[in-house]
Image (tube, grey):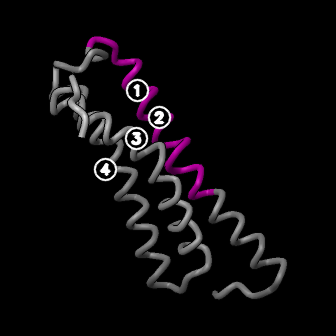
């Protein structure tokens, strides 16, 4: 591995942000499909997992802003708020809604939705 100038705090923050950008939309799309097409228990499990993922990312980004003063944007709370709003809404909630809504619309048109 290449040497990095990032400390452990900035490395963790970078890992969280990059996982929201690249991994979380795929996982949230799968959970949205599971919630829309699954049975009662899988719907509840999918919804609970989606809420847990959203809370983890939001609290992780919010907590890093207050617990680690080494971060460069510590003094600008507006940047932290926009990072949380854009990260959670744009990269977590939106893929879930698109998969959930698309599955519901496709199921209603074909008449195969499990109730």
Crowd class of label 2 (few under 14; some 14 to 19; many from 20; radius 10 Å): few
Mark 1 or mark 4: whose residue is earlier in sequence = 4
Mark 3 or mark 2: whose residue is earlier in sequence = 3
Mark 3 or mark 4: whose residue is earlier in sequence = 3
Crowd class of label 4 (few under 14; some 14 to 19; many from 20; radius 10 Å): some
Distance from disc 3 to disc 4, alpha carbons, whole Å, reads 14 Å
Task: Check if mark 2's residue and mark 1's residue have beta carbons within 8 Å.
Answer: yes
Distance from disc 1 to disc 4, alpha carbons, whole Å, reads 15 Å
Q: Residue at x 21, y 23 (%)?
A: 5
Task: Check if mark 3's residue and mark 2's residue have beta carbons within 8 Å.
Answer: no
Element carrying mark 1: helix
Crowd class of label 3 (few under 14; some 14 to 19; many from 20; radius 10 Å): few
Location of mark 4 (residue) = 56
* Quadrant containing the N terminus in the rendered view: top left
Q: Which residues are magenta?
A: 75-97
Label for residue 81? 1
Label for residue 85? 2
Asked whether 24 or 33 is in front, the reply is 24
Location of mark 3 (residue) = 18
Crowd class of label 1 (few under 14; some 14 to 19; many from 20; radius 10 Å): some
């Amino acid at each position: 591995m290449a040497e990095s100038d990032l400390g452990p705090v900035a490395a963790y923050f970078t890992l969280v942000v990059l996982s929201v950008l690249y991994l979380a939309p795929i996982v949230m799309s799968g959970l949205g499909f599971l919630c829309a097409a699954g049975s009662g228990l899988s719907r509840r499990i999918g919804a609970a997992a989606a809420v847990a993922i959203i809370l983890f990312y939001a609290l992780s980004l919010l907590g890093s802003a207050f617990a680690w003063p080494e971060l460069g944007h510590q003094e600008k709370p507006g940047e932290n708020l926009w990072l949380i709003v854009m990260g959670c809404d744009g990269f977590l909630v939106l893929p879930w809604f698109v998969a959930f809504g698309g599955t519901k619309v496709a199921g209603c048109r074909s008449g195969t939705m499990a109730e």
